[in-house]
Image (spheres, helix red, strand yellow):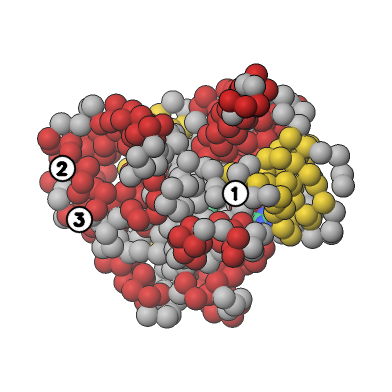
Amino acid sequence: MAEPWDVVIIGGGHNGLVAAAYLARNGLRTLVCERRDIVGGAAVSEHPFGAGYTITSLSYVVSLLPAELVRDLRLDRHGYHVYPQGPYFAPRADGRYLRLPADPGERYAEIAKFSVADAERYPEYEARLARIAAVLGPLLTQIPPRLGSRRPRDLLAQGLLLRHLRAVDTRLAVDLTRLLTGSIADLLDAYFTGDALRGVLSVSGVIGMWAGPRSPGTGYVTLHHHIGESGGQQGAWGFPRGGMGAVTAALADAARSFGAEIRTGAEVAAIDTRAGRAAGVTLASGERIAASTVITTAHPKLSFLRLLDPAALPEDFVADIRAWQTRSGTVKINLALDRLPVFAAHPEFDPQVHGGTIVLAESLDDIENAFQQAVGGRPATLPFADICIPSVFDDSLAPPGRHVMSLFTQWVPDSYAEAGHDRELESYADRVIARLETVAPGFTGSVLHRQVIGPHQMQEEYGLVGGNIFHGELTMGQMFHARPAAGYADLRTPVRGLYQAGSATHGGGGVTGIPGRNVVRQVLADLRAERIGARIDRWLPARTR
Ligand SMILES: Cc1cc2nc3c(=O)[nH]c(=O)nc-3n(C[C@H](O)[C@H](O)[C@H](O)COP(=O)(O)OP(=O)(O)OC[C@H]3O[C@@H](n4cnc5c(N)ncnc54)[C@H](O)[C@@H]3O)c2cc1C
């Protein structure tokens, strides 16, 4: 047996590192075991094209990481720096483009190029989302109560939840219900008629989803992407200097500075239990590491169906984990370029364009069709893409004059998680690049290197089971008290001393750090309760017990 730790954390993704930093800051001897040779999980920077290029392999922008977490962990001292991402820029095959700048006057003029009526209504749309975000945003940071439980402690937590609904009037109650149950198409239909605007706005409703813009629940996903902030601006996103791997490198440094230890190349093969409670982990190497508290941030299907014996867990819990939906059909494409693209619609260099969110999505119908093709078992012929070129701001990512481009695209069939489909993925990537060629002639010739990461690689290499980017679909049936199983949204699990804090728990779904931060509150509360219980046991005469 190696030296005992207070807490062992499975997974060195951002949530595991956040938890490690807070635990160590609270004086607990904390060890992180990460399977890969590098920390970061889905928030990682790598060098597939050689040392000169840094690629933000999977995730690419931040917004949801709470500002107080950044302050608490002093991440700026560990190199955390975020460049604001420019606005949407959607070039079109007909040579026109739509931009959505932050300045209301400029934005009006841009939308009015396509539809004056849409430009008039845009502020109302934003105001509606902002009103709903003001209610739902704070809920994202909460530990959900056990809805339905009659235990006094849970009833109290359920009562406290009502505080958050104080701001809800009759109008907002209906708007909220419609947003949560409806599709992004329903929401957009209520405001806009133009294809260009509806196409761009529907993207944020389907990012990472196995759902098209007409699927119920995609209204909420849009809101999820509006809840965060960057540079103090609500709903804004930013590029971390050094790619997303710099965020997790800063978290790892912070955790170490508080005294945590991080081991890479340390795959956990089993979570050990003794008399029904967590006792540590056994690594794939056979090494056993003792700890009375274990936190898993791995995907729930890995944690509860592979690292534990499901037969030793409650049937109802195991049924929820087996039924957990975790598809998305996402393909991430990373490129190295020898020059910036020249857009036919906007040929001059503009940091607001080249440093913005370049969206290839000309209409909501195109996006829906792409999804329907994937549902039918074929990769989309016209995939949509959410693109950024972080090297426009960040000179650490590529040699002078060269650039890196990150393309988040959808969809291929969800069944692609089961096998590589390399040939099909390469053809799919060709189609995305051809789409760019249409709006930026000469683009194809600027590509020096390319990397295509499909659902199978996401599953096998990065632990994203089913290829879902959030460890589990962000649908209403998998949110809040239902994330990931009935009675266990409070980050505890059926095994005493075992906690969960990956993206498949509430607050997860993106680089939020919220599960990692909240799980520490639960661990500390339970340790305090155990200490008090032990003291009471010692004080009470044996016969009164
Ligand atoms: C293509 C893509 C694009 C995305 N874009 C964005 C974006 O721009 N912005 C955003 O906010 N979010 C984005 N996301 C989502 C976001 O990256 C994830 O939700 C988040 O990073 C997950 O963090 P995590 O710490 O919960 O889990 P992970 O990052 O998945 O970390 C879990 C870790 O556990 C490790 N592990 C698994 N099993 C074991 C084991 N047995 N032993 C030891 N270690 C183990 C894994 O290797 C992994 O490192 C994107 C995701 C993807 C895939």
Q: Is residue 45 visible?
A: no
Left or right: 260 in relation to 160? right
Nearer mark to the viewer, of 3 and 1? 1
Q: Amino acid at mark 1?
A: Val
Find residue 326 and report its horizontal and vertical position in percent: 48, 63
Q: Nearer the viewer, residue 231 or 304?
A: 304
Find residue 295 and report its horizontal and vertical position in percent: 64, 44
Nearer mark to the viewer, of 2 and 1? 1
Find residue 349 and report its horizontal and vertical position in percent: 48, 45
Which residue is rendered at x = 79% and y = 44% of the image?
290
Q: Which residue is mark 1?
A: 495
Mark 3–mark 2 distance (CA, rounded to whole Å): 14 Å
Which residue is rendered at x = 47% and y = 28% of the image?
231
Q: Secondary structure at mark 1?
A: loop
Within 10 Å of the Cα at label 3, are there few (<14), some (14-19), or many (20+) other Cα atoms?
some
Q: Amino acid at mark 3?
A: Asp
Q: Which mark is residue 174?
A: 2
Q: Is residue 17 visible?
A: yes
Q: Which mark is residue 460?
A: none
Which residue is rendered at x = 48% and y = 41% of the image?
490
Find residue 373 and report its horizontal and vertical position in percent: 37, 76
Sequence-wise, which precedes: disc 2 or disc 1? 2
Within 10 Å of the Cα at label 1, are there few (<14), some (14-19), or many (20+) other Cα atoms?
some
Mark 3–mark 1 distance (CA, rounded to whole Å): 42 Å
Q: Which mark is residue 186?
A: 3
